[in-house]
Image (tube, rainbow, N blue to C red):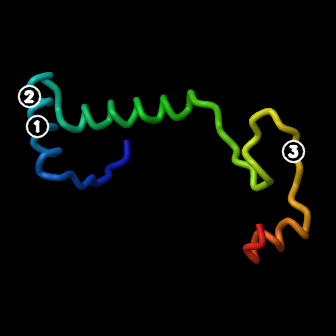
Amino acid sequence: MRKTSVYLSDDEAEGLRRAALREGRSQAELIREGVRRIVADADSKPRVFRSMGKGHGGGRPYEPWTSDELYDKVMGRR
């Protein structure tokens, strides 16, 4: 196990204290449980890759910008 420090607002610290008393568990145990839930949730979601190409998909085939389109866009011509 590794030791770490966490900064909480006064409201968060008080809420954690009350939850620990209500559950009959330590604050550290509740924090570890919360971290495990977040990690499990993040691991269960598929990774989303964002394209740097033209558009956002939507079923249309990928068409990269042409140099003229890029130039016109940067120069504010369209």
Which quarter of the picture shows residue 5?
A: bottom left
The reply to whether the C-beta atoms of the residues labelled 1 and 3 are less than 8 Å apart is no
Q: CA distance from mark 1 to mark 3?
A: 53 Å
Identity of the residue furthest to the bottom in this view: 75
Location of residue 24 in the rendering, given as x and y in whole percent from the top left corner: 12, 23
Q: Locate the N terminus and report the quarter of the image it occupies.
A: top left
Q: CA distance from mark 1 to mark 2?
A: 6 Å
Q: Locate the C terminus and report the quarter of the image it occupies.
A: bottom right
Q: Residues within 10 Å of mark 1 (few under 14, many from 20)?
A: some
- What residue is rendered at 27% in x and 52% in y? 6
Which amino acid type is marked by label 3? Answer: Tyr
As displayed, is residue 65 above or below residue 75? Answer: above
As displayed, is residue 70 above or below residue 51? Answer: below
Question: Is 26 on the left or on the right of 74, as rendered?
Answer: left
**Which residue is under mark 1?**
17
Q: CA distance from mark 2 to mark 3?
A: 56 Å
Q: Nearer the viewer, mark 1 or mark 3?
A: 3
Which amino acid type is marked by label 1? Answer: Arg
Identity of the residue furthest to the front in this view: 78
- What residue is rendered at 33% in x and 33% in y? 34
Instruction: Give SS at disc 2.
Output: helix
The reply to whether the C-beta atoms of the residues labelled 1 and 2 are less than 8 Å apart is yes
Sooner in the amino-acid sequence: mark 1 or mark 3: 1
Instruction: Give SS at disc 1.
Output: helix
Q: Nearer the viewer, residue 55 or 78?
A: 78
**Which residue is under mark 3?**
62
Sooner in the amino-acid sequence: mark 2 or mark 3: 2
Which amino acid type is marked by label 2? Answer: Leu
Disc marking residue 21: 2
Q: Nearer the viewer, residue 57 or 47?
A: 57
Instruction: Give SS at disc 3.
Output: loop
